Amino acid sequence: MNKPLRRIAIFCGLLVLALLIRDNWLQYVDAGNLQTRQENRRVSIERYATPRGDIIVDGKAITGSVATEGTDFKYKRTWKNGEMWAPVTGYASQAVGATQLENLEDGILTGNDDRLFFRNTLDMITGKKKEGGSVVTTLNAAAQKAAFEGLGNKKGAVAAIDPSTGGILALASTPSYDPGTFAGISNKDGETFTKLDKDKDKPMLNRALRETYPPGSTFKVVTAAAALENGKVGGIDERTDSPDPYRLPLSTTDITNEHGQCKDATLRYALEVSCNTVFANLSDKVGNEKMIEQSEKFGFNEPELDIPVRAAESIYPKDNRPQNAMGGMGQASNRATPLQMAMVSAAVANDGKLMKPYMVDQLRASNLDVIETHEPEELSQAVSGDTAQKLQAMMETVVKTGTGTKAQIPGATVGGKTGTAQHGLKNSEKPYAWFISYAKLSDGSSPVAVAVVVEDGSANRDDISGGGLAAPIARDVMKAVIDSKK
């Protein structure tokens, strides 16, 4: 072979080799990436080719599927009481994709999860159509209904947790949306989604998980914990060295109180009537570093809290002395999600042990074989058992004779803390109403801890308070959980 022909042959050989390498790269190395790309319509066609598996609450499906016409997507998702359950399930739309549980457990729900390979192989051999599996949640239907109906037309959120396991019992957010209104792929579905997405009231925002608020006086429970754990106070009935008014350190600003005789008040009384001066003073005595340390034991400053839906990070920041003192009252740069404040209450109720919150109890195949079961996991020892008992005594006084009397439940012992968090430039906006609580039964067990926040765009400013707006909602959620266990 002469030299020019040899060069051509080598060049052609290299082209063939490059083609083989590229073909194998696409088929094996990059296959997963190509399969999951949004532009790959075949993935979506397969996702909606069969009825989707269900999300289960209290043994009953809160979702379903219905056949569609005029499209190569054969089935679309349906929901029962979609507005109530949207903060739990998220949406699964042929037009815009999926979120929350519908997205995170998509493999199980569509039947495409690798753990279903054996089941799918058997179905293929027997000629049975592939079916999606089910996602069994920890939710309590009665508690979710009480939370959703309690919020009503008010803007706000509720998170309820089983303190002993971390299982989430309710997760409500209002205003909400019905994911079934844009589950298809028509122009109308797309228009509905766009309208909801641009709504100024943000109905698609999961306020229980993804919105952070100044926690207001509910944070005083954390400050009390820090003061007790760091020896800044003795007993909860011993008088504190607390001036009234209290001048913020390094400033000319005085902190005052809305209620009570707070000068040198005991810790129990200070929580009962919500003395700003006592808790600002204690936060300064504890110091910013120790306040951060205590907050983090309750779950603050955790950027990756997955339940499995990721919650927004609740913040207790590094700050100067005056801001840290304000932070001890739940103001300044301090921010928390409703889930986070439910975690605070749950840890107190569980004798100081904070369990990691979770929402999925089991994953099951279509034949009900259990693929995965969640095991409760301890997140931290937020406070000692002795400190937890003291915090319980203080919170129970709040409900017995203090600002939280509307949370009382006959036959149960309730501990709680109200909060009214200021916001807006120079506090010009209507404040947020907070309430955190737990309920204990006669056997000493605590089946539920709750956090409620009401943004409230309708009430007069003077009528807004955690005890007036949020406490009755928390009471009804706790009662629903207690009644469901009878």
Image (cartoon, rainbow, N blue to C red):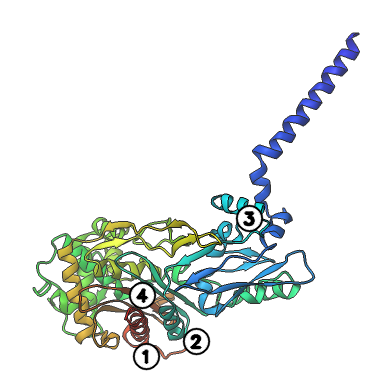
Q: Secondary structure at mark 1?
A: helix
Residue type at mark 3 is: Asp
- Check the picture and name the quadrant holding the N terminus: top right
> Which mark lies nearer to you, 3 or 1?
3
On screen, 448 above or below 363? below
Which circle's residue, 3 or 2, is located before the other in the chain? 3
Q: Residues within 10 Å of mark 2 (few under 14, many from 20)?
A: some
CA–CA distance in space, label 4 to label 2: 18 Å
Q: Residue furthest top?
A: 2
Q: Are marks 4 and 1 in contact (CB under 8 Å)?
A: no
Quarter location, residue 300: bottom left
In the picture of the structure, the residue carrying the numbered disc 1 is: 463
| C-alpha gap between disc 1 and disc 2 | 16 Å
Tag 3 residue: 123
- The tag earlier along the polypeptide, 1 or 2, is 2
Q: Which residue is mark 4?
A: 451
| Whole-number angstrom distance, CA of label 3 to CA of label 4 | 45 Å
Residue at coordinates 36% horizontally, 80% vertically from top-left? 484
- Quarter of the image for residue 410 reads bottom left
Q: Which mark is residue 153?
A: 2
Q: Quick one: label 4 or label 2, which is nearer the N terminus? A: 2
Q: Nearer the viewer, mark 3 or mark 2?
A: 3
Q: Amino acid at mark 2?
A: Asn
| Mark 3 vs mark 2, CA separation in Å | 47 Å
